[in-house]
Amino acid sequence: MEEQAAWAKVLENVQQALERAEAETAKREQELAAVLPEAAENDPAGAWPGCFERVDARMQGLRSQTEQAGHSAAEADTALAEAEVGLREWLANAERSEKRLANWAAP
């Protein structure tokens, strides 16, 4: 369960970092929008909207990667839980064997 809590904390940190990045991007978009009319005069082709679209696409990519990391973490948690069960069974068998050997060796 500690592993699961650790993964949850990692994912929480990733989510917080993405939220900060998204907020910073939104702030930059607003700052750029404030100078957009001035930029449009200097750039008749209007390159700024394309920049915003690229930023949005990158943010979608980050969201997708975060989701994929969550799925990978869930799969890892499942594998770790299954391994833990197997290990606990092995340890229980080893303890039983140890007791049997001790009883057998006892005079």
Image (cartoon, rainbow, N blue to C red):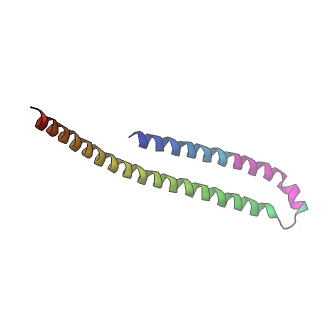
Q: Is residue 9 left or right of residue 35?
A: left
| Region in magenta | 24-41
Percent of width and height locating residue 57: 65, 61
Q: Residue at x 59, y 43 (%)?
A: 16
- Determine whether 71 is above or below 85 in the image: below
Q: Residue furthest bottom?
A: 45
As rendered, which of 48 and 4 lies closer to the eye?
A: 4
As rendered, which of 38 and 70 lies closer to the eye?
A: 70
Q: Which residue lies furthest to the top in this view?
A: 107
Q: Which residue is drawn at 25% across and 45% down?
A: 89
Give residue 39's quadrant in the image. Answer: bottom right
Total tally of numbered discs in the picture: 0
Q: Which residue is drawn at 28% across and 43% down?
A: 88
Position of the C terminus, as image quadrant, is: top left
Query: What main secondary structure does the magenta stretch of the protein show?
Result: helix
**Does the segment drawn in magenta span residue 76?**
no
Position of the N terminus, as image quadrant, is: top left
Q: Which residue lies furthest to the right in this view?
A: 42
Percent of width and height locating residue 12: 53, 43
Percent of width and height locating residue 80: 38, 49
Q: Residue at x 90, y 61 (%)?
A: 41
**Does the segment drawn in magenta span residue 35?**
yes
As rendered, which of 21 and 48 lies closer to the eye?
A: 21
Percent of width and height locating residue 52: 73, 59
As rendered, which of 2 and 13 lies closer to the eye?
A: 2
Q: In this view, does 28 lie to the left or right of 93?
A: right
